[in-house]
Amino acid sequence: MMQAAAQRWRDHKHPGSIVNIVVVTTHGLYGIAHTIAARSGVIGLSRSVAVEWAPLNIRVNCVAPGAIETEGWNVYPPQARAAYPRSNPMMRAGSSWDIAQACVYLAGPSGGFVTGETLTVDGGGSVSLVADADRSRLPLQHCHI
């Protein structure tokens, strides 16, 4: 699909922007090695074609959602769903609107000088080193501002 869009934009000498939705691949997750491998491939492909297609004014980026509350959560048991908001320092789940806004940023004029990047939208979960159980007990005076 990316190739078809890029060929059309190239043939019409029109700029373009592609945003691929992947997953956070910075750490392993139990039972989804196949998903991590596939999405890592999409990230690598996106970075490669971002370089190839940049001279054609075609940008390619990825959005990597973290714990985003959607109807897909219903396949998981309640105790698992209850833990998702604690998977990031913001202590909440994201929404599909958060992901949509990230895509608009990357696809639109605001992202006009961004290509080959993966924008992680996970409430800081991929950079957090504080364990879930400890994070909920941190008093506010320990927050450095």
Image (spheres, grey):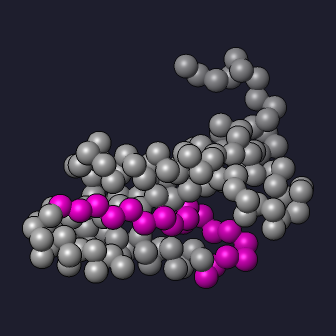
Residue 46 x, y percent position in the rendering: 34, 70
- Vertical arrangement, residue 13 with respect to residue 3, above or below: above
| Residue occupying image coordinates x 73% and y 59% | 71
Q: Is residue 11 left or right of residue 96?
A: left
- Vertical arrangement, residue 36 with respect to residue 136, above or below: below
Residue 52 x, y percent position in the rendering: 19, 73
- Vertical arrangement, residue 143 with respect to residue 78, above or below: above
Our reading of the magenta stretch's main secondary structure is loop
The quarter of the picture where the N terminus appears is bottom left
| Residue occupying image coordinates x 81% and y 67% | 75
Residue furthest toward the front?
12
Q: Is residue 70 left or right of residue 24?
A: right
Q: Quadrant of residue 58?
A: bottom left
- Vertical arrangement, residue 99 with respect to residue 76, above or below: above
The quarter of the picture where the C terminus appears is top right
Q: Quadrant of residue 30?
A: bottom right
* Residue stretch rendered in magenta on the structure: 15-34
Q: Quadrant of residue 73?
A: bottom right
